[in-house]
Amino acid sequence: MRNAPLGFFDSGVGGLTVVRAAQRLLPHEDIVYLGDTARVPYGSKSPETIRDFAAEDVRFLLSHHVKAIVIACNTATAHALPALRETFRVPILGVIEPGVEATLADPDTDRVGIIATRGTIRSHAYQHALAQRKTGLIIHAQSAPLLVPLIEEDWLDHAATTAALHTYLDPMVDKGIDALLLACTHYPLLVPTLEKFLPSDVRLIDSATTCAEHLKAELDRLDLLNDSEDRGKLQIHLTDLSEQFEMLARRFLAHPPGKIRRAIL
Amino acid sequence: MRNAPLGFFDSGVGGLTVVRAAQRLLPHEDIVYLGDTARVPYGSKSPETIRDFAAEDVRFLLSHHVKAIVIACNTATAHALPALRETFRVPILGVIEPGVEATLADPDTDRVGIIATRGTIRSHAYQHALAQRKTGLIIHAQSAPLLVPLIEEDWLDHAATTAALHTYLDPMVDKGIDALLLACTHYPLLVPTLEKFLPSDVRLIDSATTCAEHLKAELDRLDLLNDSEDRGKLQIHLTDLSEQFEMLARRFLAHPPGKIRRAIL
């Protein structure tokens, strides 16, 4: 069981930033990744639809005999995690709890900004989880729907991106924030741009890295760490294949993705 | 038969700009609209997947006994129209031919710009149709994937939109174009912005209006014009419902959409 693969799923290829972080921390784990690119994005869809899609994604990964599942998608974590945990017996981890915990790890954090897709912000999942853990916390939540398409275009230093960041971030920066939580798995690619854009005393929390750290701790706790000394293998399955997705997969993973397969859900 | 409704489909709600143009020209026609919002956008997906989705969309409309079908989506027209016409017997119209004919209606048009989603540009459907009709035509085709998300955000006058338009349009404007073909059903909302942005001698061709004109001519030719004197009714079905889609439907239609139903394909 401990040498079975880990399953990851996302609405598209953004979740590969979580895979990349996991590969660094857990180099011996085999990974099966499912990107539901035929129905990407989930962020603008309704909670019921997102729950239906996520259950299909989990079933696909279970058919690959995974030992645990990571929802490498903020929107799906926000809307589907509790329902999935009720339905399936495999351990299922989301990206929200780890990001929230990392944000509050510094006890001087009193004012937190969150940026994410519209679906994630509207779910109030981050706001709720933060407020539950620390009373009196000031939270500025901002949906930033243009950032995913801008990142997918690789317009990281484009004037359009700067203009969008001004609209999304100036109001919360003017009010003052101690940390900015990047609550979308696409956003790690924007970190260099954000480091230039934001005041230097704002801490950036990226949910891909924090999720991988949490995954390692959970596997250890459940005694599920792979004990092989070989380099883990990565299998990528997408519900729709296109040149665009292959190009994005390369950028999100930061290395060539190998053969990508078409998944039928 | 002539008093049966017209069927329209699109990957999302952008095709409502075509419905709006059709309602102006054909006020007595009943319309059944299907937006496949659970799987929007089609523009980044593969031709095979787009053809499968489009066939499901057509079957849904046929179950509503429509007399003719309009593919109110450039990507689906580009990849699926010939296959759909082979499979189904109902008259099926796309948005490409009408846009191409309107572009070349002015015989002095020698240099044409096209902007569209990546899927439409990559299909070469517009480039091919234009080149077939006029030898020696100079064509500048540019995929403009950020424009749909910018329009959906209603950032029509935002600095991010201007920055994106500079990247997409400056190269073709510098080389010189007589007409710019807006080959995406979202783009009619950007016409006022483009009129300010472009040199005044560039003609704008919007595929929603040209498609509605072509539809009227075709219905007349096939003796399928509705002879009722009542105002036509519009029924909107979406495969996923969300606040965001309802808000967009209102903007694209330019009037309240009435009750929107959830469609199961």
Image: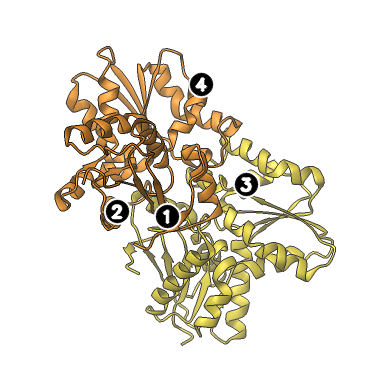
Chain colours: A yellow, B orange
CA distance separating discs 4 and 2: 39 Å
Q: Nearer the viewer, mark 1 or mark 4?
A: 1
Disc 3 secondary structure class: helix
Q: Tell me where residue B114 appears, x and y as whole percent.
A: 35, 29
Q: Chain of mark 1?
A: B
Q: Is residue A32 left or right of residue B152?
A: left
Q: Tell me where residue A174 appears, x and y as whole percent.
A: 79, 42
Q: Is residue A182 left or right of residue A87?
A: right
Residue A179 seen: yes
- Against B179, residue B96 (above or below) is below
Give the numbered dot on residue B112: none
Q: Nearer the viewer, mark 2 or mark 3?
A: 2
CA distance separating discs 1 and 4: 34 Å
Residue drawn at x 32%, y 22% is B112
Q: Which residue is mark 3?
A: A192
Q: Tell me where residue A247 appears, x and y as whole percent.
A: 40, 50
**A260 or B97: nearer the viewer:** B97
Disc 2 secondary structure class: helix
Q: Chain of mark 3?
A: A
Discs 4, 3: same chain? no
Q: Earlier in the sequence, mark 1 or mark 4?
A: 4
Q: Which residue is mark 1?
A: B238
Q: Residues within 10 Å of mark 2 (few under 14, many from 20)?
A: many
